[in-house]
Image (tube, grey):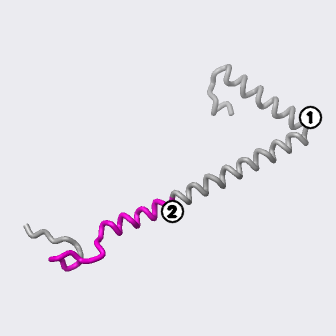
Amino acid sequence: MVSKYGDKFASRSIVAASVRAISVVIREHPSIAARLLGIGLARAAKLGLDDANDFLQLRGRSKRSDERKAADAQPSVPLVGSRSGSPVDNE
């Protein structure tokens, strides 16, 4: 935690106080600590699943939009004067 919050005295004292508070809760109130841990894990799991769902939905949308772009780029009927369906420069 110290490396994350910096080398300043105030930052170190905040980290030390947080660690001390957590250790007191775990030592003196283990049932409350277990309950808080369970709530935190459940929240993390919910957020992780929501993020994964959003990622998969966005990924599916981008694939569909790529397919639409490819469909828009190539005509379904060959153009007049072309052999492969792509326009031929007559200039």
Task: Residue 5: give x, y in percent of width and height.
Answer: 64, 29
Where, by quadrant of the figure, is residue 75 drawn? bottom left
Please name the residue that numbered disc 2 is placed on.
Answer: 60
Q: Is residue 8 left or right of residue 87?
A: right
Give the residue drawn at x 67%, y 30%: 2
Viewport quadrant of the C terminus:
bottom left
Please name the residue that numbered disc 1 is placed on.
Answer: 28
* 47 or 27: nearer the viewer: 47
Give the residue drawn at x 61%, y 57%: 53
Task: Residue 40: give x, y in percent of width and height.
Answer: 76, 44
Give the residue drawn at x 87%, y 37%: 26
Task: Residue 12: give x, y in percent of width and height.
Answer: 69, 24
Location of residue 9 with respect to 84 vertically, above or below: above
Circle 2 packing at 10 Å, graded few (<14), some (14-19), many (20+), is: few
* 85 or 3: nearer the viewer: 85
Residue 83 belongs to the span the image colors magenta: yes
Lower position in the chain sequence, tag 1 or tag 2: 1
Circle 1 packing at 10 Å, graded few (<14), some (14-19), many (20+), is: few
Q: For the residue marked with disc 2, what is the amino acid?
A: Gly
* Magenta residue span: 59-84
Q: Is residue 41 left or right of residue 91?
A: right
Residue lying farthest top?
A: 9
Q: Are marks 1 and 2 in contact (CB under 8 Å)?
A: no
Q: For the residue marked with disc 1, what is the amino acid?
A: Glu
